[in-house]
Image (cartoon, rainbow, N blue to C red):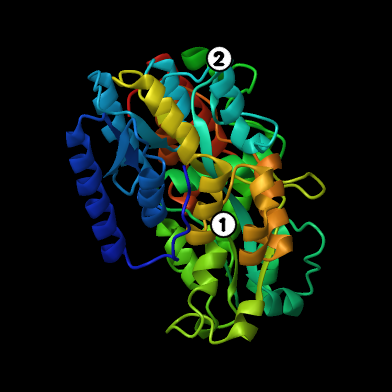
Amino acid sequence: MRLRPTTGRRQLAVTTSLVLAGTLLTACGGGSGKPTLTWYINPDGQETLNQLAEDCSTDEYDIQIRLLPSSATDQRTQLARRLAAGDDSTDLMSLDPVFVPEFASAGWLEPFTGDLADQVLDDDVLEGAAQTVTWEDEVVAAPQWSNTQLLWYRKSLAEAAGLDMTQPVTWDQVIDAAADNDATVGVQANKYEAYVVWINALIQGAGGNILDPDTVEDGRDAKVTIDSDAGRAAAAVIQKLADSGAAQADFTTSNEGTSLGQMYPENGPGEFMTNWTFVYQNYAGQIGDPGGPADEAELEDLGYARYPQTVAGEESKPPIGGITIGVGAYSKHLDFAQEAAVCVSSPEAQTQLAVNEGLMPSRQSVYDSDELKEAYPADLLELFSTSVDTGGPRPKSAFYSQISSAIQDRWHSPTSVDPSTTPKRSAEFVADILSGEALQ
């Protein structure tokens, strides 16, 4: 099997047409008598994923791609409905890591065993990514690409604020620096999953967790620990930003895209922003475009640092995201599907996704490759890999979807967050949800 390099990202309409074309071609290939494996993908990196489906098809089977909705919640819903019905055409699926425990607990994922398990999860896989693909001591998914958040900022803004960005900075410092310099702090605080990502990272950065890690796999019997000093420290950060002059106008509905928009020079001094790895390639790819950096000098003004500390002196826990590849337990072709999963998550595949799409690897060897060193600054690659390796996953629970929704209910709007009440109210609600005493 040979993985061929592709060109860079194109417009969505072109990419979608390529995916559809690839789907038709592979479907026609299935008519030759070979099995056709169906791979459900999320919308990120469609062009390269379509190429991987072609390159990882073999003389024994073809791989066809089907597109999932853009929302992680809608992706989960569609796949869960299929698998709950015992759908045997769901061979491969791109899964947000937070849904792996639920799917594995339900018996919807075929575990990797023996040599395949060793290939999928070896010492080359970064720790943060490795934590997302195991359940009850089994390897139930293959890490394909990993996501993490950094603190992105304009270097000129940090300099004006007197911040030494070679040293760790706290959320308090970032908020004060922005407020004192007519700048803003970009976050994701709409009522959706990314808001829980922020809350979880703040809590873990203060040394706590939403659920007790020692009981998290106990399902409904897990101990809820969000009502803690760490939970109150997290709420204090959100409250401070909400009450400061650094909150952006769309603070309560902000998302990854809206927060990035404030970085551009036309919007004044810019911002400090926590956001995912896509930022660099997105920003660098818009040099000279309306609203983008005017030239290389403005791109050079884009800075990046480790995720801010919740508590001064306590190492932050950058969020962990990305995509893992699961094999549907009801597939008619389990051996082929697992072989294909290994192929589409291989180091070569991860290299293509990082270079072409800005979707960063889950393997250290790929960060160390010549291809990535040509595509990204060396210090940025090191920051990405370190953040994934030492970051903090969200609660590894089969009931994560309910937990996330419960937290969103009690912590939104961010303008109403109060350290003295919000953690306690959310702990009670999550506990009631898990015990079945409350519904959402």
Using the image as rendered, state which of residue 248 and residue 7 is in the foreground: 7
Disc marking residue 404: none
Q: Is residue 378 above or below residue 136?
A: below
Whole-percent x and y of residue 401?
A: 40, 31
Name which quarter of the figure residue 63 lies in. top left
Badges 1 and 2: C-beta atoms under 8 Å apart?
no
Q: Is residue 67 above or below residue 143?
A: below
Give the amino acid at mark 1.
Answer: Thr
Q: Determine whether the residue tagged by mark 1 lies in a helix, strand or loop.
A: loop
Horizontal side of residue 124 vs 14, given as left or right: right
Residue at 54% from the left image edge and 55% from the top image edge: 354
Residue at 25% from the left image edge and 43% from the top image edge: 26
Whole-percent x and y of residue 305?
A: 71, 60
User: To which residue does mark 1 refer?
Assistant: 277
Whole-percent x and y of residue 371?
A: 62, 59
Horizontal side of residue 234 vs 166, given as left or right: left
Horizontal side of residue 348 vs 165, given as left or right: left
Q: Can you see residue 307?
A: no
Q: Determine whether the residue tagged by mark 2 lies in a helix, strand or loop.
A: loop
Disc marking residue 136: 2
